[in-house]
Amino acid sequence: MTASSATIISCASCGKVLDDRTPHSTCPDCDGMLDITPATPLVRGTALAQLFDGRLGIHGARGSAASQSGVWRFRELVLQTDDDSIVSHPEGNTPVIHRRSVSQYAGVDSLRMKHEGHNPTGSFKDRGMTVAITQARRCGATAIACASTGNTSSSLASYAAHAGIPALVLVPSGRISMGKLAQTVAYGARTLLVRGDFDDCLRLVRESARSLGVYLGNSLNPFRIEGQKTIIFELLQQCGWIAPDWIALPAGNLGNTSAFGKALSEAHQLGLIDRIPRLLCVQANGAAPFALGFAERFATRHQVRAETIATAIRIGDPASWDRGVAAIRVTNGIVIAVSDDEITAAKSAIDASGVGCEPASAASVAGVRALVSQGVIKPHENVVAILTGHVLKDPEGSIGSGTSSRPRPNAPIEIDADLASVERVLRNSGKS
Ligand code: F0G
């Protein structure tokens, strides 16, 4: 299917219009954020939903990666490009999971979890990265760089390796989980451990992109946002194109929040859904500039020195602030902050159900529980929580040492290699 207009890329600050193969991720004139307006698809409403539904599962394992991808299934709303230029593993096609124990924990009749940890590198970042690296290839980028708390870097390293483009990664030294650092290095990225925090890394990578001419892969890059919109499109498709009441997600740099707002408003405008669900953005108490802003109707842009066990969202100066505000406004959304203990407790509930996730992801379920107890979310409402990363991303946070403040009741116990020791442990655990 073709479209009736072309993709438009323009600067949100000065209005400059750029070519759709631009090598810039921010405005070359004023460094403002770039907005992408996708070409208008030729069909809308039910016909568009049918087009997307018709692509489900038809290619099996025989089709190209792009034809199997849960991102490129929605290509009309993502990026118009030929199949040969697409860099895909494939990605997406993540499950929507229900566990009674987690619903009970959150306090709603039925909580569904969309588990983005099932992406190829274990986080939702792959959805934006397939598009950003495809664009890097389209514009002839010779190197690609990002700052990261670990998931973006893992994803960028993996997709850059797939495309054969050298990757440069800046992460805060000693402040990302071992699982993510291991992945980033394994996929071959040149990895710099910066003595500073994520916000320092982002400032530095933006300066490097400008002066060294490398392509910027952070979510400031508008193509990342276009890919991440497909979390929403796929979720709506899995809900039979009936919008849930609430969608909860963890919020750090606000790229995902921006993508969700954009996707929901596009889906509504195109008649894929007849109402827009409310977003619930959840931050950690020690890294909650956006929640502080929300509490005063975004009168000021807050910056904090971030500290939380949820290392993925340990961000004090979110880059996509304005887009995040727009997303909250268009969805009549809410932003709250929860404590590290609430995050750890929610993670334990998700892990104990056999689903598992990394600490930051559990913030979404902790946020639902908090809003239910405040009476804002009603138990009968239809709620989806996005789990953004896989349980193996942060092994220290799961075993109960390192980043977690609460030891697990089943923390591993070392024993001598004899049956008596096994029996002794089993007898003692029966007593606890
Ligand atoms: N959840 C996880 C697991 C993340 O890795 C991130 C961000 C978020 C939530 C928040 O998303 O930044 O779009 O608001 N991780 C980035 C990274 C910062 O570098 O991997 P956001």
Image (cartoon, helix red, strand yellow):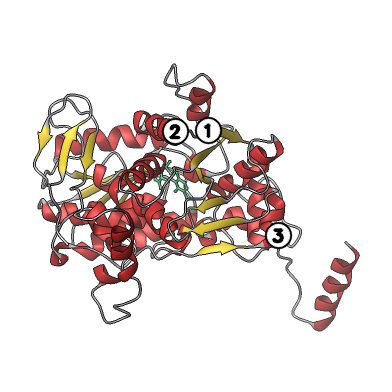
**In which quadrant will I find the C terminus?**
bottom right
Callout 2 amino acid: Ile
Q: Are marks 2 and 1 in contact (CB under 8 Å)?
A: yes
Depth check, mark 2 against mark 1: the one in front is 2
Q: Amino acid at mark 1?
A: Val
Q: Is residue 77 above or below residue 255?
A: below
Q: Secondary structure at mark 2?
A: helix
Where residue 112 sits, quadrant-wise, is bottom right
Amino acid type of the residue that numbered disc 3 sits on in the rendered structure? Ser
Q: CA distance from mark 1 to mark 3?
A: 25 Å
Q: Which residue is mark 1?
A: 335
Could you tell me which secondary element the residue under label 1 belongs to?
Answer: strand
Q: Residues within 10 Å of mark 1 (few under 14, many from 20)?
A: many
Tell me residue 85's x, y (percent).
Answer: 14, 62
Which residue corresponds to the image point at 84% horizontal and 73% vertical from the top-left? 426
Residue 400 visible, this orientation = no
Q: Which residue is mark 3?
A: 101
Q: Earlier in the sequence, mark 2 or mark 1?
A: 2
Residue for point 30% across, 57% down:
157
Q: Which quadrant of the rendered structure holds the N terminus?
A: bottom left
Residue 277 visible here: yes
Viewer-closest of 329 and 187: 329
Position in image of residue 148 (x %, y %): 37, 44
Disc 2 under 8 Å from ligand 1? The reply is no
Which residue corresponds to the image point at 22% horizontal and 63% vertical from the top-left? Answer: 87
Label number found at residue 328: 2
Q: Residue at x 48, y 20 (%)?
A: 297
| x and y percentages locating residue 408 in the rendered image | 72, 56
Going from N to C along the chain, the mark reached first, 2 or 3, is 3
